[in-house]
Each structure stands twice: as C-alpha cells, then as structure tokens.
Amino acid sequence: METKPKIYITRKIPQAGIDLLSEKYDVEVNPNDRVLSREELLSAVKSADGVLCLLTDKIDAEFYDAAPKLRGVANYAVGYDNIDVPEASRRGIPVSNTPGVLTDATAEMAWTLLFSVARRVIESDGLMRSGNWGGWGPLQFIGGDVSGKTLGVVGTGRIGTAMALKSTGFNMPVLYTDVVENKVLDDKCNARKVDFDTLLAESDFVSIHVPLMDSTRHLFNAETFKKMKNTAYLINTSRGPVINEADLVEALKKDEIAGAGLDVYENEPKMVPGLAECVNTVLTPHTASATEDARTNMALKAARNLSAMIEGTTPPDCVNSEIL
C-alpha cells in the first residue's frame, strides 16, 4: 500500500483547512494551542513532506536541515518575514502565503483602531464598567474628529488600498506614500502621492501597511514622531518592528502625538515597558484577520497552496515561483 505524504501543521487552524489536506495526506497537527518550542518544531518536521506554519515559527536553514523530505512550506499569513525565502529557493523548496482573503478584515481592524483611539473608547468603557461614572459632563473624554481629517497611508498594497478606500464615507483627504503610483486611490479617492515627510507633517491619522523589510524596520522612531502633528494618531496593523516601540512610548508620554492604535508589536507577545500604561492607546493582540471568513479562507488557501507543492504543480500564491 502506497504511503501518503506527511503534512505537519504547526498549530491548529480552522478545521476546513485541515479537512482539505486530510482528504489526500497523512496530516498531523500540533495538539497544543501554543507556539512550539524550537526543539519541538524541529523534531516534529523530521518526516514531513509539507509544513503549514505560522508567523510565530522561524523557518530557516536549521529548519530545512531538520526536514530532509520537505517539498513545500505554506505560511498561514500574508507576511512571510519569518521564513528565509532565499535559503528555501536555494534548496528548491517553494514557499507560499495567503494574500487577498484577509484584506478587508485587516483594513476594517485599522479603522476599528482608528475610531477607538480617536474617540477614547477603551478609557470611557473602563470608567463605565468600574461603576464610577458620575454622569454626563461637557469636558469628559474629548477625543479627535475623524470626518474631514487627513488620512495618511504608508504602503498601498492590497490592505493599504482597501483601508484608504473606506475613508470616502468620511470625506477625508487621502495622502499616501509608496514606491509606485496607486491609480485606484488616485481615481477613487482623489488621493495624493507624497513623500514620507510630507505625509507625516500633514496627516491627522497615519495608518501603516508596509511589509517588514530592512528598509521598514523602525521606520517609525523618535525622529519620525517629532515630524507628526501632536494631534495625530498612529495606527499599525502591519508588522510590529516597523515601529520602535520604546520611542513610541516616549512620544506618547510627551504628547508628541495624540495616540496610537496597535494590533502588532515589536517583540510579540511582549510589549515594551510603559506601553500598557499609556492611556492614549488601543492595544489588540494581533487579531486583524480574526473574522470567521478571513481565518477560514486563510486555512483553505494555505492548504491548497501546500497541496499544489506536494503534487508538484505551481502553488497559486508562491512567493518564490522563479524556482518552479
């Protein structure tokens, strides 16, 4: 009897993706709802033909050495800075991600953070729950206006574009910075492509949508915050290390900016000291894609990509397709 290829999934994902792979392959899933230790991960993939991994898994030369049968790696995420793609390419191993299916969910979370921090939702919710609210007052929880204010979008790929398009209902001028023109935003939002410093100086809300690369690591730092309006809000649903978190804490404490809404962090799952005490923040635990449809479709997309790798066909979302 022919042995089925073995698939290892590094953490439980929505069942639809597991079921899809189980139709054809011998699938093993990390039984614990936690990130595997390095030793556990390397041991688990020894006999794997394919691995479906998460951003929390470091996929590097040591990993590839531990999985000599490996035919493909499918990342359950849009970003893939956790994977050494050049090393995978050198070894002829395809790598995929999950673009598209979480675009709206992530863009919606950026707006959730924007409104929540501008209108001081967390602070006022906390007071209400404490039982200490003494009744309405004209100076209570005064926040920032949204309608008519300038939105600055840093990075206009799928998610940045979707986020900016959703601004039209609030009559917001849109500025963006990217390496290329975005005709969709130019046409539908009458957006202006500007340099980074201009965006910082003129925006009332700055929403980050860049991938993590050497050029974007700590793109936002002490110098950057000084260039922003002291009434401006920073929103990040991209990658934590794009912001120097210690510098952000200082900027928030000094009122160099009005507030920040973060879904990602520099050293997840930890935050730098002081961030949690900043009342002018909204802090969510990397949940931008956490909707039923988005997470299920991510699972299905990752499963289909991995299946294509095992079958020797081109994965729909291969990030190193030049090797195929």
Image: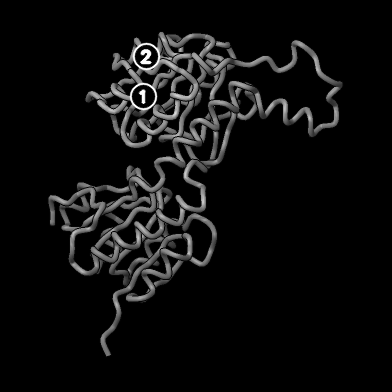
Q: Residue at x 48, y 9 (%)?
A: 229
Label 2: few (<14), some (14–19) or many (≥20) C-alpha neighbours in 10 Å: many
Instruction: Read off the residue under disc 1.
Output: 154
**Above-or-below relation of 159 to 294:** above
Residues under labels 1 and 2: Cα distance?
A: 8 Å
- For the residue marked with disc 1, what is the amino acid? Val
Q: Position of residue 53 (x, y in %)?
A: 38, 56
Compared with 91, 144 (above or below) is: above
- Do tag 1 and tag 2 residues touch (Cβ < 8 Å)? yes
**Quadrant of the drawing holding the N terminus:** bottom left
Quarter-of-image position of residue 222: top left
Q: Nearer the viewer, residue 98 or 66?
A: 98
- Name the quarter where the C terminus is drawn: bottom left
SS category of the residue bearing label 2: helix
Is 264 displayed left or right of 154 in the figure?
A: right
Q: Amino acid at mark 2?
A: Leu
Residue visible at 39% across and 33% down in the picture: 162
Q: Which mark is residue 199?
A: 2
Label 1 sits on a secondary structure element that is: strand
Residue 55 as seen in the image, left or right of residue 286: left
8 versus 174 height, above or below: below
Q: Position of residue 157 (x, y in %)?
A: 31, 33
Q: Give whichever of discs 1 and 2 has the lower sequence position.
A: 1
